[in-house]
């Protein structure tokens, strides 16, 4: 998934708007040991605000909370302006009260369940304990893995943990990188786009993906690409494993145990491997989940692979589990225009067979499906009465009409000029508008991601049929796409859009569906096996 980069933030939030940003996130009031107080009062002047997602029933939370309390005491005791807001996942108010009594900071009121859900979704909290750190001056995210950050800096020596650029995290200009040939420093990467590959020898998906990435890298170098480089960040368990695995790779590396690896992983929010992140020459994140791009562009022509507004599921589902995602399943549709040509060919065949059979020329009450002269047009068979030989009393559909109708309803549909291309065009227009809006707001990704399914399991896409199964959707249709909005961060919720034909899925209709979701007008359903 494109992962929000800590270096690509929008310009500094104008003075006076920070409190409104935090209030919009947390609500008008927060709970303190002295009762509820205005959010603006409680957080005024704080350099860093931590959001602590935790619960009384969670074993790892109960273990981490005392350590966090020690860090909180050390940091605030040193006069540093730090505050933590407890965001409870407790099941009832009594459990919340008992747990909060053990904590020295402030809290989101337990009754604000809607705010809690919004925060979990915004910061993609998939498990607890999670500590998100916000810049109190701008409201921007410093880290979504504050737990690891404070584990490495429990006394807050580096407070307020300013955001660092990728080149700085790699060790600055003098930072050394492992190479199979000459000594390489970060300074040697100046002006180059970079792919950072998080992987490990023991990981089966990594072992399957690495050869494809190697072939892509070699193809790019063979094409004369000197404006790029790859860096392997190892999660191997031993030096021997790392050496064996890195020996297969033609690029640079950071060895296991190097603190730079952990810092980069935290910076990009890496939650699993293999993960491939691409960076432009200025150190800005281009694609936080570029693994799928290798399959669709095996020679790296489009490197550093900016994420397209609409991702085809056959190229990977990155972001689907972590973000609200609109998915258009169109694998049953043709491309539109080819279907019309097929209809014309069948119509010509029908006319030839009609001439050979010499049917009668009595008037027909049908809808002129075949358009032949002498018959007044030939009906579809539901109303048309046609005798193959004079005197026959049995209603028949003429051969031309039969074949023409068969062509028009091939596989149960009238070929639609929209087809996959039209559906993709409508989806792409809505996705681009959402992306532009996000960039205007200073966000790297929109609040809704967009995907399209154009293939099935037999064509190398196992994700599309799985979505159909979980969302209880029918088999692929040849006349209309199926549209589903997956809100997996909301405990596996989803919403469906009724679409009768491909032509109905216009930009306006799809945008209206997204707007209705955001306005809470749609009926929520629950994903199931």
Image: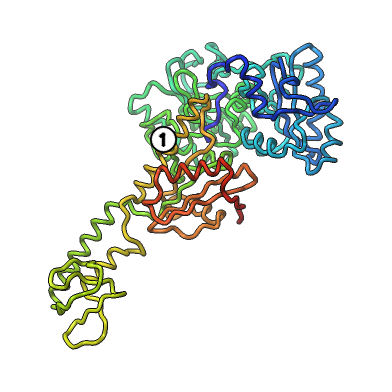
Work out whether residue 23 can be spotted.
yes
Name the quadrant of the C terminus. Answer: bottom right
Q: Residue at x 52, y 38 (%)?
A: 448
Check disc 1 and report its element: helix, strand or loop.
helix
Work out whether residue 258 can be spotted.
no
Q: Is residue 41 left or right of residue 178?
A: right
- Colour pattern of the rendering: rainbow
Task: Give the percent coordinates (x, y) of residue 363.
Answer: 18, 76
Q: Is residue 156 left or right of residue 389?
A: right
Task: Give the percent coordinates (x, y) of residue 201.
Answer: 57, 36
Say if 358 sits above or below 417 in the image. Answer: below
Q: Residue at x 45, y 22 (%)?
A: 280
Say if 250 sits above or below 421 in the image. Answer: above
Name the image quarter holding residue 149.
Answer: top right
Identify the residue position indicated by label 1 in the image: 215
In the depicted view, which residue is nearer to us: 193 or 286? 286
In the depicted view, which residue is nearer to us: 151 or 116? 116
Q: Residue at x 61, y 31 (%)?
A: 235
Q: Is residue 255 left or right of residue 111?
A: left
Task: Give the percent coordinates (x, y) of residue 418.
Answer: 33, 50
């Amino acid at each position: 998934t494109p992962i929000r980069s800590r270096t690509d933030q929008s310009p500094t939030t104008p003075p006076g708007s920070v409190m409104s940003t935090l209030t919009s996130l947390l609500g008008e009031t927060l709970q303190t040991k002295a009762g509820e107080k205005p959010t603006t009062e409680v957080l005024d002047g704080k350099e860093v605000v931590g959001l602590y997602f935790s619960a009384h029933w969670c074993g790892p939370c109960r273990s981490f909370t005392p350590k966090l309390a020690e860090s909180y005491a050390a940091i605030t005791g040193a006069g540093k302006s730090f505050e933590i807001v407890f965001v409870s996942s407790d099941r009832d108010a009594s459990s919340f009260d008992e747990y909060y009594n053990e904590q020295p900071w402030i809290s989101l009121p337990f009754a604000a369940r809607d705010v809690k859900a919004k925060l979990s979704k915004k910061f993609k909290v998939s498990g607890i304990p999670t500590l998100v750190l916000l810049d109190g001056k701008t409201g921007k995210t410093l880290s979504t893995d504050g737990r690891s950050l404070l584990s490495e800096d429990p006394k807050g020596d580096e407070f307020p943990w300013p955001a660092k650029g990728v080149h700085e995290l790699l060790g600055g200009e003098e930072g050394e990188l492992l190479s199979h040939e000459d000594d390489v420093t970060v300074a040697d990467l100046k002006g180059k786009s970079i792919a950072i590959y998080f992987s490990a020898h023991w990981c089966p998906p990594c072992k399957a993906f690495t050869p494809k990435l190697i072939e892509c890298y070699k193809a790019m170098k063979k094409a004369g690409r000197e404006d790029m480089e790859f860096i392997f960040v190892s999660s191997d368990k031993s030096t021997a494993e790392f050496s064996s695995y890195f020996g297969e790779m033609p690029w640079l590396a950071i060895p296991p145990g190097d603190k730079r690896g952990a810092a980069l992983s935290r910076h990009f929010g890496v939650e699993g491997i293999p993960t491939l992140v691409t960076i432009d020459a200025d150190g800005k994140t281009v694609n936080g989940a570029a693994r799928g791009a290798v399959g669709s562009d095996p020679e790296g022509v489009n490197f550093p692979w900016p994420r397209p507004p609409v991702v085809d599921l056959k190229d990977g589902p990155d972001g689907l589990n972590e973000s609200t995602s609109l998915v258009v399943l169109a694998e049953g549709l043709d491309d539109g225009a080819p279907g019309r040509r097929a209809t014309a060919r069948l119509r010509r065949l029908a006319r030839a067979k009609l001439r050979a059979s010499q049917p009668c020329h009595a008037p027909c009450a049908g809808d002129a499906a075949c358009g032949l002269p002498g018959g007044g047009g030939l009906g579809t068979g539901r109303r048309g009465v046609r005798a193959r030989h004079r005197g026959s009393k049995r209603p028949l559909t003429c051969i031309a009409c039969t074949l023409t109708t068969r062509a028009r309803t091939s596989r149960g549909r009238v070929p639609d000029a929209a087809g996959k291309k039209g559906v993709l065009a409508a989806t792409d227009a809505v996705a681009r508008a959402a992306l532009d809006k996000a960039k205007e707001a200073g966000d790297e990704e929109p609040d809704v991601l967009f995907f399209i399914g154009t293939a099935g399991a037999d064509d190398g896409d196992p994700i599309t049929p799985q979505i159909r199964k979980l969302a209880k959707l029918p088999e692929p249709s040849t006349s209309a796409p199926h549209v589903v909005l997956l809100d997996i961060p909301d405990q596996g919720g989803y919403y469906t859009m009724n679409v009768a034909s491909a032509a109905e899925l216009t930009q306006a209709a799809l945008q209206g569906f997204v707007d209705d979701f955001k306005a809470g007008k749609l009926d929520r359903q629950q994903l199931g096996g």
